[in-house]
Image (cartoon, rainbow, N blue to C red):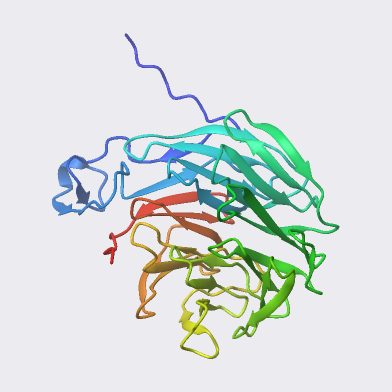
């Protein structure tokens, strides 16, 4: 039986860039020659995850720049949204396969952010068309759309209300409002994040401050300061005690949001190393989850991903691989795997050294 030739990729097809004949047993042959017989230097790579290779490039799902990408709560799916108005849902079998499961277009404008539901197969997306959309990722059917803002919606977050079993969604827009209880910030909102108990909402805006609103009181209770420019995203630590916030000033802050912080300014760490660039891109950071949040990561305009140790503040990794600004990062919930998305329209899955769970 003759071998079937490789067909050219069609639009919307995911291309997994990997070696045609990967080396066996975690050994890599290094040589500048294409002749297999001249590859004499063998290096053993210690594997830390169940990915089929230490680095896997996911390309072809989007024709435009990727603006956000995230693992689902189980770590078996990856979703990414793009300026090409589409969302791709990739079913990830970390042991062997990475295949494009579904691509859909729930919006009429660039999709700026997304979040997975914590309790169902729903994907929340927000867009420049002023809509919040809920889509069933198993079918690609749009469940509901909500026009909650008058301007571009930049960001979204969700949480489970304590004791109620109800999922709450928060969005932030250029119209300066936050529609959970319609908080008026007074200037465009770039980022939102729920507190661990679902009672507080953290809102980053172009006034360089992070506003903290209490839903029970329906009022702002205090602000987090320290940034010299607009915070681009907010991410809560796994233990709910710290808040990660990159900014346009290329400075990333970790705020202490515990009720009784030892620091009056509530600035726990000041991190440098991820340049924001001049494009004013909303860079989205993330906390590691397999080790309880000992590391944080933010992409940069230098086309690299910077990973810091939270306790010491030192840089652990500067990861290359993209050809454009790295706009979004996320950590696998169970394994030491980092997901990155870039303006070059590609995503990269890479394994790192596992952290020590304290």
Query: Between 239 and 247, which is closer to the camera in this rendering?
Result: 239
Query: Which percent across, then down, holds residue 122?
Result: 61, 39
In this image, 9 relative to 204: left or right?
Answer: left
Q: Residue at x 50, y 83 (%)?
A: 260
Query: Between 93 and 17, which is closer to the camera in this rendering?
Result: 93
Q: Residue at x 43, y 58 (%)?
A: 321
Query: As displayed, is residue 47 above or below residue 9?
Result: below
Query: As displayed, is residue 121 above or below residue 64?
Result: above
Outermost residue to the bottom? 264
In this image, 295 relative to 219: left or right?
Answer: left
In this image, 310 relative to 70: left or right?
Answer: left
Q: Residue at x 27, y 44 (%)?
A: 34
Q: Is residue 209 visible?
A: no
Query: Which percent across, then down, holds residue 242?
Result: 49, 73
Residue 291, picture quadrant: bottom left
Query: Which percent across, then down, holds residue 68?
Result: 59, 54
Quadrant, the C terminus: bottom left
Q: Is residue 26 visible?
A: yes
Query: Which percent across, then down, holds residue 29?
Result: 20, 49
Query: Between 131 and 236, which is closer to the camera in this rendering?
Result: 236
Outermost residue to the top? 1
């Amino acid at each position: 039986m003759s071998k079937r030739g490789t067909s050219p990729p069609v639009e919307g097809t995911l291309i997994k860039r990997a070696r045609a004949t990967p080396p066996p047993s975690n050994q890599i042959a290094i040589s500048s020659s294409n002749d297999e017989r001249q590859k004499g230097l063998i290096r053993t790579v210690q594997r830390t995850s169940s990915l089929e290779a230490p680095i896997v490039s996911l390309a072809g799902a989007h024709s435009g720049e990727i603006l956000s990408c995230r693992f689902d709560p189980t770590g078996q799916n990856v979703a990414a949204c793009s300026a090409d108005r589409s969302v791709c849902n990739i079913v990830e079998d970390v042991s062997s396969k990475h295949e494009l499961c579904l691509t859909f277009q729930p919006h009429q404008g660039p999709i700026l952010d997304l979040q997975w539901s914590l309790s169902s197969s729903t994907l929340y997306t927000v867009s420049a068309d002023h809509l919040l959309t809920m889509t069933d990722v198993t079918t690609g059917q749009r469940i509901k759309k909500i026009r909650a803002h008058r301007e571009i919606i930049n960001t979204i977050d969700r949480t489970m209300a304590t004791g109620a079993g109800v999922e709450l969604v928060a969005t932030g827009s250029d119209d300066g409002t936050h529609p959970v209880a319609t908080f008026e910030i007074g200037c465009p909102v770039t980022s939102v994040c729920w507190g661990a108990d679902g009672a507080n909402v953290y809102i980053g805006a172009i006034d360089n401050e992070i506003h903290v609103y209490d839903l029970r009181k329906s009022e702002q209770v205090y602000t987090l300061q320290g940034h010299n420019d607009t915070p681009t995203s907010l991410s809560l630590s796994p233990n709910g005690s710290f808040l990660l916030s990159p900014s346009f000033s290329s400075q990333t802050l970790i705020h202490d949001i515990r009720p009784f912080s030892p620091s009056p300014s509530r600035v726990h760490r000041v991190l440098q190393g991820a340049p924001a660039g001049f494009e004013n891109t909303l860079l989205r950071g993330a906390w590691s989850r397999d080790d309880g949040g000992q590391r944080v990561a933010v992409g940069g305009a230098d086309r690299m991903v910077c990973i810091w140790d939270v306790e010491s503040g030192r840089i652990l990794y500067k990861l290359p691989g993209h050809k454009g600004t790295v706009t979004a990062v996320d950590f696998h919930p169970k394994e030491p795997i980092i997901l990155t998305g870039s303006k070059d329209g590609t995503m990269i899955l890479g394994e790192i050294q596992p952290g020590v769970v304290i």
